[in-house]
Amino acid sequence: MSRSPIGSTPVVEGTAAEPPILVSACLLGVACNHLGRASASDAVIELSRTRRVVPVCPETMGGLPTPRPAAEIQADGRVTTSDGVDVTDRYERGARATVELALAVGAREAVLKERSPSCGCHQVYNGSFSRTRMPGEGVTARALRQAGVEVRSEEDVSDI
């Protein structure tokens, strides 16, 4: 077992024949979401027991602290915090770092945290900070898709 770039989360070695799967670190129990908590998913943790996974937190990889203010994608595509601070550059930096890591380790799949402004695969919050969901994808999910990585949420992990 080796260590991931996110703290001391283990990377399950799996087999050399299977490429690793990028996984949102919060889904594996790492306390890195905006509240400084984990969003552990039993299904994703179970996946990590049988497949090689590489934990990622694009927001921390982009230089944001944990905990951090809530952020949402606005209608113009910018990412702002609830107090109006534009953090788009940090989200884009984290997305680039995540894509670079995916390419470096040969990952062709990613399991990401739904509704996150970085990792949302099918839904994100609408930018009003009212917890209203809308169809869309986060900055990192979009970047990974554009790089050819198959992206799914923790809600779709049974498809693997």
Image: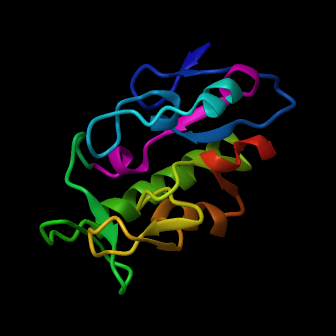
The answer to whether residue 108 is left or right of residue 101 is right
Residue 31, image x, y percentages: 35, 31
Q: Quadrant of residue 21?
A: top right
Q: Quadrant of residue 72?
A: bottom left
- Taking the spot 35% from the left edge, 86% from the top edge, the residue there is 76
Which of the two residues, 140 or 131, is positioned nearer the viewer here?
A: 131
The answer to whether residue 95 is left or right of residue 152 is left
Extreme left residue here? 83
- In the displayed structure, 10 sits above or below 53; it is above
- Taking the spot 37% from the left edge, 46% from the top edge, the residue there is 61
Query: Which stretch did the figure color magenta?
Result: 48-63
Is 109 magenta? The answer is no
Residue 83, image x, y percentages: 12, 67
Residue 44, image x, y percentages: 63, 33
Which quadrant is the N terminus positioned in?
top right
- In the displayed structure, 134 sits above or below 28; it is below
| Count of numbered tags | 0
- In the displayed structure, 81 sits above or below 31; it is below
Is 56 magenta? The answer is yes
Q: Coloring scheme of the render?
A: rainbow
Extreme top residue here? 1
The answer to whether residue 135 is left or right of residue 150 is left
Which quadrant is the C terminus positioned in?
top right
Which of the two residues, 118 or 40, is positioned nearer the viewer here?
A: 40
Residue 81, image x, y percentages: 21, 65
The answer to whether residue 149 is left or right of residue 33 is right
- Taking the spot 39% from the left edge, 25% from the top edge, the residue there is 7
- Taking the spot 58% from the left edge, 40% from the top edge, the residue there is 23
